[in-house]
Amino acid sequence: HVNLLMNRARILFKLKEYNNAKQIYSKILKLTQEKEIRKETLATLAQINYLNKSFDEAEKLFDESYNLADSHEKDKYLNNKYAVIEAKAKNFDTLKQYEQSAEQYLRLKNMFADDKLKSIGYIMKAIDEYKLSKNYSKIMSLYSEIANLNTLKNQVLAAYVNARTIAD
């Protein structure tokens, strides 16, 4: 019974009949505790929510599928979560909700704390959003954070010059 529903839901998803597929996938979650089916179902529901710009729900569902994933699959689900957060940031930007957009980029910065270049890249995206909202104190704080992350003197100097330019 569940396998038949899975096949039907997959077909509907491929046909881009997302609302119908979502209904069936939701029903499947209620019918089975089988790990692989639940993982696929949660991930597909996350994709549907992503496509419908329900980013919070998509992120939650990717987290649930991540928790069911084997160690060799976890990166895939984590990358999907990062993509959802970035899409959420871009959506806030489109809606001219720049502060909320910046907050999403700062979430990503924190998730990539071990990768200095990615972290700085997300800080710069947040700075761009804060510029649009004219939150200069936050911009100054973030340039200072970049300076603390950089170990090369000329990079530190550049960050402080940018901060000084904003201050003036």
Image: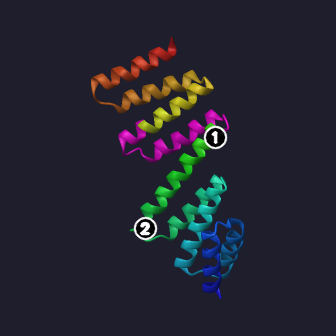
Q: Quadrant of the N terminus?
A: bottom right
Q: Quadrant of residue 7?
A: bottom right
The residue under label 2 is which amino acid type? Glu
What's the colour scheme? rainbow
Who's the residue at 61% across and 80% down the image? 6
Residue lying farthest to the top in this orientation: 168
Give residue 113's position: percent from left, percent from top.
41, 44
Residue linked to disc 1:
92
Q: Residues within 10 Å of mark 1 (few under 14, many from 20)?
A: some
Depicted 44 relative to depicted 84: above or below:
below
Marks 2, 1: nearer the viewer: 1
Residue linked to disc 2:
73
Q: Residues within 10 Å of mark 2 (few under 14, many from 20)?
A: few
Give residue 120's position: percent from left, percent from top.
41, 36
Q: CA distance from mark 2 to mark 1?
A: 30 Å
**In terms of secondary structure, where does tag 2 sit?**
loop
Front-lying residue, 19 or 111: 19
* Residue segment shown in magenta: 95-120
Depicted 128 relative to depicted 32: above or below:
above
Who's the residue at 27% across and 28% down the image? 152
Q: Earlier in the sequence, mark 2 or mark 1?
A: 2
**Can residue 111 be found in the magenta stretch?**
yes
**Can residue 39 be found in the magenta stretch?**
no
The residue under label 1 is which amino acid type? Phe
Depicted 126 relative to depicted 113: above or below:
above
Q: Main secondary structure of the magenta part?
A: helix
